[in-house]
Image (cartoon, rainbow, N blue to C red):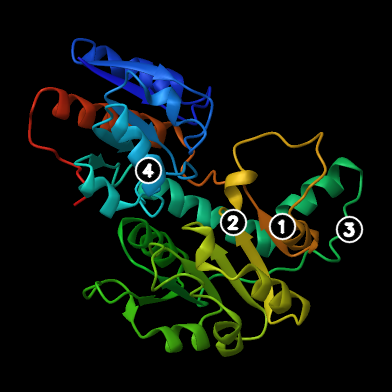
Amino acid sequence: MMKLALFSAQKYEQPFFERNLTEYADSVSLSYFEQSLNINTTPLCKGFDAVCVFVNDTVDKHVIADMAAVGVKVILLRCAGFNNVDLDATKEHNIKVCRVPAYSPEAVAEHCIALMLTLNRKTHKAFNRVREGNFDLNGLLGFNLFKKTIGIIGCGKIGLALVNILNGFGAKVLVCDPMASEGPYTLCDLDTLLTQSDVISLHCPLNEHTHHLIDASAFKKMKDGVMLINTSRGALLDSQACIQALKSKKLGHLGLDVYEQESELFFKDHREEIMQDDIFSRLISFPNVLVTGHQGFFTQEALSEIACTTLQSANEISQGLPLTNEVS
């Protein structure tokens, strides 16, 4: 039986794992740890065959070496991205890595739309006004998405799901993705997308080529008052450049579900603490910025698929079966 340690465990996900675990009760046992995985918590891995991690766990070469030393043979990612895992180190220590490649593209795509519409139509501000008896419409003016040009950088499963939704709005959709084929959108290069789009949404993976893809030079190419949405990875954006673009009004609306330094902030309650991140504090001080705490994936369907796929991978390894979702 595979003994699996699940790090960064949240109460909301445990029922989904427990429901799906019944199918694999003879091959997988599961223990939950609220602590995130990092160099200080690797001793908790002792006695386990595998670890299950999320987006903000640290799985660098030092953590991997420590895990290998106590017998960990498998890393299971309960997310699609694997930029936080040192794959060279896993190969060196003969540790297998599996992920959840498509837990619910529609969940994240729909959250993008929620950010766009909330920023545009200011429903969050209207909600507070009406509760206070204020029905004044001044300051709530928005624009139609119909016939607007919306640029999508990265058109994998999530990007394509967003394309389909935006086509329903009657928007003109531009796509920049070297891997994309012809589809219900207009393919273009990055410069064309940046210069022509009224709204830009990021859906590409984070790697050495896309780190700070949106920086000061990229903002200079954009339309004045552009809306920018990021539900992919925080480090695609240069946060300091975002602040300058907001101050100059080059950036008219900013919607974030991810943040470059989110590992110290997201998935925790900091209400009684003094915010130490000055950049994040400055970002959320702007009235045209909307931040959610990495909740784009957070639907019943997505959590069920994450649990099911993760435990399926654990069972495949335990039973010596071919791996469906291995990261190569």
At x 34%, y 30%, the residue is 51
Q: CA distance from mark 4 to mark 2?
A: 16 Å
Mark 1: which amino acid?
Phe
At x 34%, y 17%, the residue is 30
At x 61%, y 72%, the residue is 227
Mark 3: which amino acid?
Asp
User: Do the residues bearing badges 4 and 3 touch, measured as CB atoms within 8 Å?
Assistant: no
Seen in the picture, residue 223 relative to 115 is either above or below; the reply is below
How crowded is the residue under tag 1: few (<14 C-alpha within 10 Å), some, or many (20+)?
some
Residue at which label 1 appears: 280
Q: Nearer the viewer, mark 3 or mark 1?
A: 1
Q: Tell me where residue 274 appears, x and y as whole percent.
A: 83, 43
Q: How many marks?
A: 4
Q: Which mark is residue 249?
A: none
Which label's residue is closer to the chain start, 4 or 1? 4
Q: Tell me where residue 91 appears, x and y as whole percent.
A: 21, 48
Seen in the picture, residue 216 relative to 87 is either above or below; the reply is below
User: Do the residues bearing badges 3 and 1 touch, measured as CB atoms within 8 Å?
Assistant: no
Instruction: Name the secondary structure under disc 3.
Output: loop
Q: CA distance from mark 4 to mark 1?
A: 24 Å
Q: Which mark is residue 136?
A: 3
Which label's residue is closer to the chain start, 4 or 3? 4
User: Do the residues bearing badges 2 and 1 touch, measured as CB atoms within 8 Å?
Assistant: yes
Q: Tell me where residue 240 appears, x and y as whole percent.
A: 68, 71
Which label's residue is closer to the chain start, 2 or 3? 3
Instruction: Name the secondary structure under disc 1.
Output: helix
Residue at which label 4 appears: 79
Q: Tell me where residue 283 appears, x and y as whole percent.
A: 73, 62
How crowded is the residue under tag 4: few (<14 C-alpha within 10 Å), some, or many (20+)?
some
Residue at which label 2 appears: 259
